[in-house]
Image (cartoon, rainbow, N blue to C red):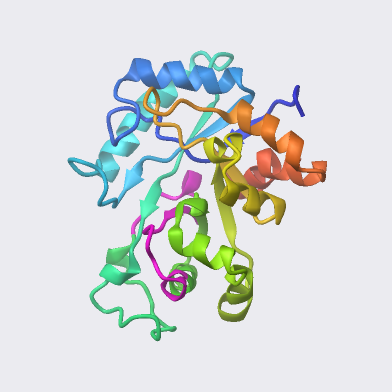
Amino acid sequence: MKDKKGYIDMHSHLLWGVDDGAKTEDESLYYLHDLKCQGVDTAVLTPHMNSPYILGGCADEETLRRRFAELKDVCEKDSEKYPKLILGSEYHYDIRCDKNYRGGSDTLYTIEPADFHPITMGQTDWVLLELPWDISMFDLLITLKSVARAGYRAILAHPEKCITIEYEVLKSSFMSKLRKYYGRKIYVQNEAWDIANNYEMARWFVKNKITTVIGTDSHGEHRPPVFNKAVQRLDEIVEDKDYLSAILSKNAETILKCVK
């Protein structure tokens, strides 16, 4: 896989000046070019939305779309230097904050449209979903069901960072609870940094073929992209090269197939 091109980065904060990622246009362009040099031909920019963790708050949708159009125009003028850009968002959603949610027994809970308004991945029905780090397993499962009932398909953003999932994995109950209470496939974005640095939870998702796509979660200078290092590590630990190709590009191509 060392000479493979055409990778797709499904999670980054390289849209400048809108969250805790890249601060300037020059910083955005520098690290987008870095991604291109690492073999990434398409980068989905996923600025934070609805996140309680961003000092000063998240930019509104109008600002995100305007800034993206400006950056995309610059990159398209030098397409050999920069990857193709697609707009999405990393949408933080905590079902526990919804005023009508009654807890883990509320299995038929339906999200109100006013409580859930992400920018989807390239105007598809796919949303990169950031969950609270301490969400319970049952709240997680009901969240996935509720998002599906609202007409979206969720990709879990870096679930290896969620302590609840880590706990369930360590006691070997994560997949059994998914099968019993959710009953359908989950879609997972694991982080290139975690894979490159051999983080145990990220390895678990990869080794069990639960990983769907890879994202750098690059924040520019604060967290440079390491897609190429993740590819090197994956090449060492993944024996099924068709699966490797799927998580590096083919699955993302399927998700983004309607994007022009």
Quadrant of the snapshot with the N terminus = top right
Q: Tell me if residue 258 comes above or below residue 134 in the rendering.
A: above
- 29 or 102: nearer the eye? 102
Residue 253 falls left or right of residue 122: right
**In the image, is 158 to the left or to the right of 211?**
left
Residue 35 pos. (x, y %): 54, 23
Q: Is residue 53 visible?
A: yes
Above or below residue 180? Residue 239 is above
Residue drawn at x 29%, y 50% is: 51
124 is within the stretch colored magenta: yes
Tell me where residue 39 sits by quadrant.
Answer: top right
Magenta stretch encompasses residue 114: no
Q: Residue at x 82, y 45 (%)?
A: 240
Image coordinates for residue 164, horizontal then vertical, percent: 45, 64
Is residue 183 shown to the viewer in this render?
no
- 65 left or right of 78? left
In the image, the segment drawn in magenta is 117-140
For this orientation, the residue located farthest to the bottom is 105
